[in-house]
Amino acid sequence: MQENKFQTFGDFYPYYLSEHQHKTCRLLHVVGSSLVLIEVAALLWFMPAWTWWLLLPFTGYGFAWVGHFFFEKNRPATFTYPIWSLMGDWVMFAQIITGRLSLTPQDG
């Protein structure tokens, strides 16, 4: 079993950002996260069968993983750090849409 080299989310987040240096990867994360929020609102509004909720991860992770496999060319952090990676997705999303983080990294 792999030892967790990060003790806090604050330690993990710089690593998370380093795995998201390609602007298309970041854009696909933003698109996927935006669609998840829209889907959640629609699911709450229309109250469909609970099975529709099972599709949410495919939307968010589908876009993100395309960004990693085809543009970033790395393995998503979700596979090693699932909880912190999910937290990182939403922190990065919030920082990008509020302008605190660039969609185009300075060094990428």
Image (cartoon, grey):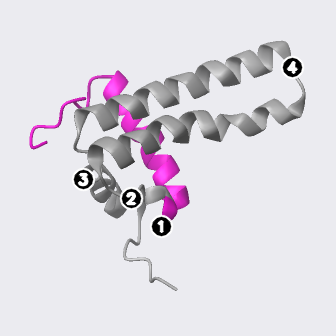
Q: Are marks 4 and 1 in contact (CB under 8 Å)?
A: no
Instruction: Name the front one of labels 3 and 2.
Output: 2
Dot 1: element: loop
**Residue 108 visible in the picture:** yes
Say whether marks 2 and 4 touch (CB < 8 Å). no
Q: Residue at x 90, y 27 (%)?
A: 49
User: What's under tag 1, amino acid-wise?
Assistant: Thr
Q: Measuring from the top left, give residue 23's x and y in whole percent.
A: 24, 33
Residue corresponding to mark 1? 80
Q: Which label is found at residue 75? A: 2
Q: Earlier in the sequence, mark 3 or mark 1?
A: 3
Q: Are marks 2 and 1 in contact (CB under 8 Å)?
A: yes
- Mark 4 nearby-residue class (10 Å; few <14, some 14–19, many ≥20): few
Magenta range is: 79-108
Residue 94 appears in the picture as rendered: no
Q: Name the kind of residue labelled 3 in the image.
A: Ser
Q: Mark 4 sits on what residue?
A: 47
Q: CA distance from mark 2 to mark 1?
A: 9 Å
- From the image, state whether disc 2 or disc 1 is nearer to you: 2
Give amino acid for label 2.
Answer: Arg
Image position of 11 with respect to 43: above or below: below
Pick whichever, 103 or 87, lies toward us.
Answer: 103
Q: Disc 3 and disc 2: Cα gap in Å?
A: 12 Å
Q: Secondary structure at mark 3?
A: helix
Q: Quadrant of residue 60?
A: top right
Of callouts 2 and 4, the N-terminal one: 4
Q: Which numbered disc covers residue 18?
A: 3
